[in-house]
Image: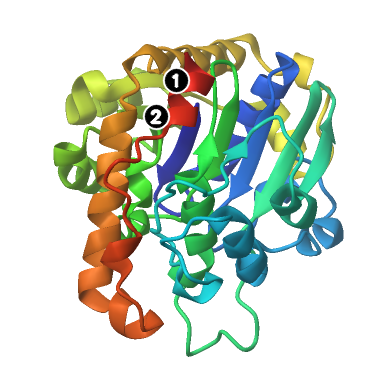
Amino acid sequence: MKIAFVGKGGSGKTTLSSLFIRHLAGTGSPVIAVDADINQHLGAALGLDEGVAGELPALGARLPLIKDYLRGSNPRIASADTMIKTTPPGEGSRLLRVRENNPVYDACARDVELDGGAVRLMVTGPFTESDLGVACYHSKTGAVELCLNHLVDGRGEYVVVDMTAGSDSFASGMFTRFDMTFLVAEPTRKGISVYRQYKEYARDFGVDLKVVGNKVRDADDLEFLRSEVGDDLLVTVGHSDWVRAMEKGRPPRFELLEEPNKASLQALQDAADATYEARDWERYTRQMVHFHLKNAQSWGNEKTGADLASQVDPGFVLRESVTATA
């Protein structure tokens, strides 16, 4: 399952995504964790030393390798230079699988040991000095979108992406790449503002969106969230001594997480798993093509010097995806 955590800055989405990743790892499930936020904190939230987290290989810095591997022998993609973040796979393209080893994972992923298991961690990477003043962060997250477009995941396999804050993911088609989007919202007017944006933007794309209420202290907070988001409210999370210790760099064993918060994490997994049977690979591919053609029409053709519309293979539905998830 492909799962996104979104929310406004400071809502706690990185903390909650890291707890969910720990929960999945504790069940023995294979997990790929992706830090796609402009502020790279997921590694530290998973227990890595700040120095180690800062030295993780950046996806954005390895785009030529990623593109060259994924295009494979696809005759519609003449070179890595003509492959952009929305380029869909076609006959001859290589697909990524959660459990396999491949050159992309070798170059861009690192195993992180947790007390309940281990996960593969990938990061977009922070801005570099050469980026400042001349690059937008979408040039970094483009590597994540390209990988998601080519990633096949089956039942009981999880890809968890800590997204950039706010509604920035709507600047590309990446918001349609997920089976489930968990929006972390505090019980405040500012806390639900991103929810309203997501709900409006995603309405026409079949995005499955659930709200996780965070920092909920009492019945009044709960009633506020229910009145603002209605049935989209899935679970709430309150104060956690375990999280407080984790934020100080001294997390106890994960099994000591408070029982109500364990139950909330299980509810997130149950909600994500429930979307499996509703997967529509043809719609997934159709949306991928839609955003690729928009990019081609707006700027991609001029930027790459190629007709990007010709990269679309109309007869290609992710057959290997269908086989893998049957």
Q: Residue 123, image x and y in percent?
A: 65, 55
Q: Nearer the viewer, residue 299 or 206?
A: 299
Which residue position is annotated with label 1? 272
Q: Residue 288, image x and y in percent?
A: 32, 48
Would you say residue 192 is visible in this rendering?
no
Q: Foreground mark, 1 or 2? A: 2
Which residue position is annotated with label 2? 179
Residue at 66% x, 15% y is 258
Q: Residue 81, image x and y in percent?
A: 51, 76
Q: Amino acid at mark 1?
A: Ala
Q: Residue 173, image x and y in percent?
A: 32, 53
**Based on the displayed image, in which of its 4 quarters is residue 254 positioned?**
top right
Q: Is residue 71 left or right of residue 66?
A: left
Up the image or down, 8 lies above or below 136; here it is above
Q: Nearer the viewer, residue 98 or 113?
A: 98
Residue at 46% x, 53% y is 145
Q: Is residue 156 left or right of residue 275?
A: right
Q: Is residue 296 left or right of residue 107?
A: left
Instruction: Specify few, some or many for label 2: CA neighbours under 10 Å numbering under 14, 14-19, or 20 or more.
Output: many
Would you say residue 221 is visible in this rendering?
yes
Provide the secondary structure element on which disc 2 rests: loop
Residue at 28% x, 51% y is 289
Q: Amino acid at mark 2?
A: Asp
